[in-house]
Image: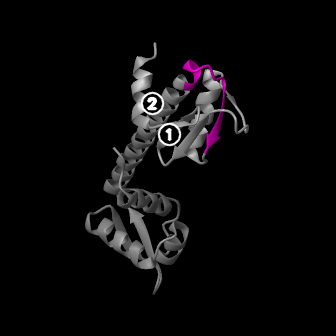
Amino acid sequence: MTISSETNRDLTILEHLEQNPDATQASLASQLGVAVGTINWHLKRLIEKGYIKVRRAERRKLRYIITAEGMALRARLTIDYIQSSFHLYRLVRERALAALNLMIAAGHQRVRIGGDGDVAEVCRLTCLERGVEIADDASVPELKIRGLKIFALLDGNELKPSEIMRGAEREP
């Protein structure tokens, strides 16, 4: 249930225009880190669908006004984004718990986290909740992060996510 980058970009554009209806295509492109042509394409599409109206503010300056339909779309996209984020959080948390449960069952109360970013943060929080100490010691088992996958490096063996999840199903 992930939302597409196109949908995510529409949401971001609507949010930016709501805060600053006098924003230019160039300023939107700069804020979003995309080409002006990409912003132009999104704006034309949003205008065609009736989510945005455009008014001439000055001779060469346009003002973008979000319609009631555009506000409703923004609300729907925001809800979809939140639901998608929570879904991904639950997935990562479940994987982290499964890997930690295997390590705890093997008698380990200290782990190191191999990776960074949001997935690593979820792993850190899960460790804290389970009372597992996070260490930098290379002799302790490792939660290895690759994308959204979490591998348990336990006693020199790398357990894959499917093995971790099967192991978690056997845990009480």
At x 52% / y 24%, what residue is drawn?
102
At x 48% / y 49%, what residue is drawn?
147
In magenta stretch: residue 73: no
Instruction: Find the residue positioned furthest to the top.
Output: 172
Which circle marks residue 164 in the picture?
A: 2
Q: Quadrant of residue 137?
A: top right
Q: Residues within 10 Å of mark 1 (few under 14, many from 20)?
A: many
Whether residue 23 is visible to the viewer of this picture, yes or no, is no
Q: What residue type is disc 2 on?
A: Ile
At x 53% / y 23%, what residue is drawn?
101
Circles 2, 1 touching at the beta carbon (< 8 Å): yes
SS of the residue at dot 1? strand
Q: How is the image coloured?
A: one colour
**Part of the protein shown in magenta:** 103-114
Q: What residue type is disc 1 on?
A: Ile
Instruction: Find the residue positioned furthest to the left.
Output: 49
In magenta stretch: residue 111: yes
Along the line of sight, which residue is nearer the eye, 86 or 41? 86
Q: Is residue 155 above or below residue 11?
A: above
Q: Is residue 43 above or below residue 104?
A: below
Q: Quadrant of residue 105?
A: top right
Q: How many marks?
A: 2
Along the line of sight, which residue is nearer the eye, 58 or 66? 66
Q: Give the residue number, with chain letter if any, for mark 1.
A: 150
Along the line of sight, which residue is nearer the eye, 60 or 90? 90
Q: CA distance from mark 2 to mark 1?
A: 9 Å
